[in-house]
Amino acid sequence: MSERSMHPVDVANRVIDSGVAEAPHNRVTHQLSVIEDDVAVVESFSHCWIVRTDEGLVCFDAGGVRHGADVVAALRSWSDQPIHSLVYTHGHLDHVGGSGAFVADAADRGHAAPRFLAHEALPARFDRYRATSGWNQMINRRQFGGIRNRQGLGIAGSGPKFLPDDVVDPDEVFRDRMSLEVGGRTIQLRHARGETDDHAWGWDAENRAAFTGDFTSWVFPNAGNPQKVQRYPIEWAAAMREMLALGVERVYPAHGLPIVGRQRVELVLGDIAEALEHLAGRTLELMNEGATIDTIIHEVRVPEHLQDRPWLAPQYDEPEFVVRNVYRQFGGWWDGNAANLKPAREAALAAEVVALAGSVEALTDRARVLAEAGDLRLACHLVEMAVAAEPMHEGAQRARADVYWQRRAAERSLMSKGIFAAAARESEAALGEEVSGQDPGGTISLSLG
């Protein structure tokens, strides 16, 4: 039996119990699995969780922009009940993008449209997306530029608008908590900041089940993202502690696999909380001692015993970026280097360095030596200076493309891979040719945002 055809709970149990990753943890199959008699999931990007009640279905998240219809079709293979309510766990497009398909399904069946519920900060997110449509599309092209067939994942960013017109605004919002009572089931919606400021999660006390959205995603928490707005790792960890204190025994995430059983829940949620608490706590300690961000990012690490956990793999975001986000939240944008408070243009600084070195070739030759020795961080600085000083220099652009393709190959997180691949492609575009034949493909088992 293939890993993708196994029941998601069986895969999760095996991975958690062994501590060894065996399969893609975010299976974008658009297939439905029944988890309990009245709870099912469509594994998409992101998942749609469905609760069956006597009064209709309650769904958590609508799937991505391009796959709403696939999600609805899978849902309808299990139940033809009206969809009473759909909860947005937050406003990222892989969670809200498929909402138009849910409205269309209701109309086709003669049902009332679902009631869409969200945290009160979500409408402001939609307004921001509309105001920064071009910017967000550029971010997604760069962030996901290192993977093959990203459109097949339903990632927005290449259309005329970042937020499609058929994405449904919420009908009702809440601030801290809201009791959702449908057909004899009570699910309490709770707010906590984490990946976003508008994140909601559902608590079914009777069944000890939490519908966690992106608070659990089977990769390292997306609490750092270098191209996006502020994340909240401290409050993310607090949300994990709150779930544990409530006695959660079933975790139903928007990405990845269900976590069933109190011991497994304690292990995974406890690890997430500990990792974030350590990164944030140590960063704040060093800030209070007067350390600069340069010192902090090269010193603070996830505790060693957590580094190989399958559910904390830095495949999308990574700990170094979380450290930067903690610093940004509490310390502002200045990095502590006085020259960077009101800096010279990068091109002017680069030209001075080239003049001191004697030539652009001196920088690019040294960059290649450093890259060959494995010091890709420093090599990237030198090729950036070479190109900034002489943008039309063919050798500088060629070295830059080559070094960044090497950098991409050496990285684990998709965010790093995407940004470094984009840099390589910039230089290839300047040259009018591919430099190294690097394969930009890859798989994704990640969260979007």
Image (cartoon, rainbow, N blue to C red):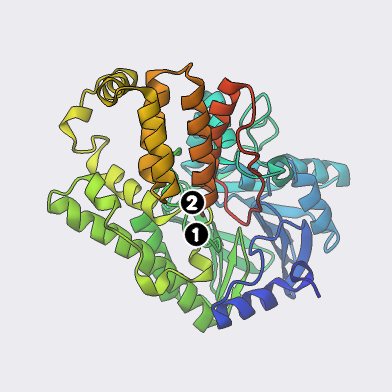
Of the pair 46 and 165, the residue shown nearer to us: 46
Camera-near label (2 vs 1) is 1
Residue 349 can be seen, yes or no = yes
Residue 359, position as x, y percentages in the image: 34, 22
Which residue appears at 45% of the width and 45% of the height?
225
Residue 65 can be seen, yes or no = no
Q: Secondary structure at mark 1?
A: loop
**Vertical position of residue 260 compared to residue 76: above or below:** below
Residue 410, position as x, y percentages in the image: 50, 52
Q: Is residue 109 left or right of residue 118?
A: right
Q: Is residue 426 left or right of residue 77?
A: left
Give amino acid for label 1. Answer: Phe
Disc on the earlier residue, 2 or 1: 2
**Vertical position of residue 254 compared to residue 250: above or below:** above
Report which residue position mark 2 lands on.
Answer: 199
Give amino acid for label 2. Answer: His
Marks 2 and 1 close (CB-CB < 8 Å): yes
Report which residue position mark 1 lands on.
Answer: 215
Residue 252, position as x, y percentages in the image: 60, 66
Of the pair 178 and 243, the residue shown nearer to us: 243
Q: Is residue 87 left or right of residue 39?
A: left
Q: Secondary structure at mark 2?
A: loop
For the N terminus, which image quadrant? bottom right
